[in-house]
Image: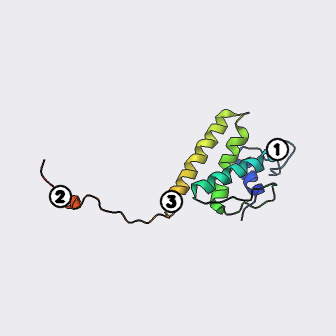
Amino acid sequence: MKTVKDIFEAAMSLMDELDGEGNAQTRDTEEYGYRTPGIVNMMISEYRILAGMGGGFAGVESMEDPVLKIDDPYALGVMQYGLAANLLVDENPAAASFFEQRYEELRNLYFSRRPSEVDGSVEDLYGGIEFGRFAGW
């Protein structure tokens, strides 16, 4: 199970904000760290809506909190782009737009490949049309 810190570090890597030793949490990224839990909560809520999960959820409050009920591939393969987009929206709109587009693309791809929870049976309302047995026009 991934933590908020894991997503933050992946986003800082995308944004080229790592220091010379590869650390994501530095004085330069301190403001990003303050904003991260709220943004991650927004993305968790979005995930739950798209996944059809009902009820409330326990949001994250700190960087060490685990991101509950989110698949690891989604947490590190999709959410990092959403976090980067939201963190850069004011200071670099072009980069934020790129990250937002990538986030939406990966999110949609992820949910399009999830198994459907809907029964696959379809009621035939037309009776015989599929075999070409209908009146001539």
- Depth check: 56 or 7 in front? 56
Question: Which residue corresponds to mark 2?
Answer: 132
Q: Quadrant of residue 1?
A: bottom right
C-alpha gap between disc 2 and disc 3 = 33 Å
* Residue at x-position 83% and y-position 50%: 25
| 54 w.r.t. 37: above or below | below
Amino acid type at image mark 2: Gly
Question: Which residue corresponds to mark 3?
Answer: 113
* Residue at x-position 76% and y-position 61%: 66
Q: Of label 3 and label 1, which has the lower sequence position?
A: 1
Dot 3: within a 10 Å radius of its alpha carbon, few (fewer than 14), some, or many (20 or more) residues? few
Q: Is residue 127 left or right of residue 73?
A: left
Q: Quadrant of residue 126?
A: bottom left
Residue 29 shows which numbered tag? 1
Dot 1: within a 10 Å radius of its alpha carbon, few (fewer than 14), some, or many (20 or more) residues? some
Which mark lies nearer to you, 3 or 1?
A: 3
Which mark lies nearer to you, 1 or 2?
A: 2
Q: Of label 2 and label 3, which has the lower sequence position?
A: 3
Amino acid type at image mark 1: Thr
